[in-house]
Amino acid sequence: MERKWIEFEAGPARPISGLYVTLNHRGFIVFSRGVFEKLNSPEAVKLLFDPATDTIGVQPCNPLMPNAFSPYQKSDSGTRVIHAKPFWKRHDIRLDGTLRVLHAAIEDGTLVLPLKPLEVVKKTPRSRKGQRVR
């Protein structure tokens, strides 16, 4: 039997900017070791929001600032996590699952995370009324 192969030409999914950052419904901002190093491995960051462009900014800051978030290392891979749930609530950011930021960039020392477009990494089922979904 002769096979009629169709070649997949798109390649693996990668962030367009080369900077790997994900956001999720629980308020986590997760970025790769490479992104952390490009920010000069800060002890703390402050979070910024531009409502006109739906863009999050992550800017290194002094850890003693009252609005400082401390990125913690998630695993041996060097991935860093910021738990930004209060920021999500303040700016009414609602996400379904885990989403990859496609056009992340570093501008003047600030990690810029446009909320559009995003790519689904993992979809979280919506909770049913009266049921708790983990």
Image (cartoon, rainbow, N blue to C red):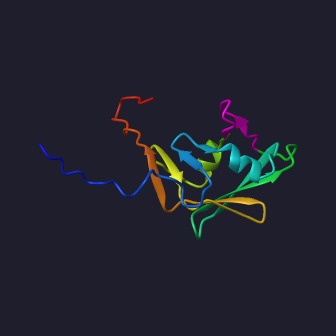
Answer yes or no: is residue 96 visible.
no
Looking at this view, is 65 or 38 the one in front? Answer: 38
Magenta segment: 69-80
Location of the C terminus by quadrant is: top left
Task: Say above or below: 26 vs 56.
Answer: above
What residue sits 14% from the left and 47% below the top? Answer: 2
Between 31 and 95, which is closer to the camera in this rendering? 31
Quarter where residue 122 is shown: top left
- In the drawing, does residue 19 fall left or right of residue 96? right
Q: Nearer the viewer, residue 109 or 131?
A: 109
Q: Quadrant of residue 19?
A: bottom right
The x and y percentages for residue 11 are: 43, 54
State the quadrant of the N terminus. top left
- Give the residue furthest to the bottom: 52
Residue drawn 59% across the image and 61% down it: 17
Magenta stretch contains residue 93: no
For image coordinates 19% across by 51% down, the residue present is: 4
Picture coordinates of residue 112, whole percent (x, y): 66, 61
Question: In this rendering, does residue 110 appear at all?
Answer: yes
Whole-percent x and y of residue 103?
A: 57, 62
The number of numbered badges drawn on the structure is: 0
**Residue 76 x/y as whole percent:** 68, 30
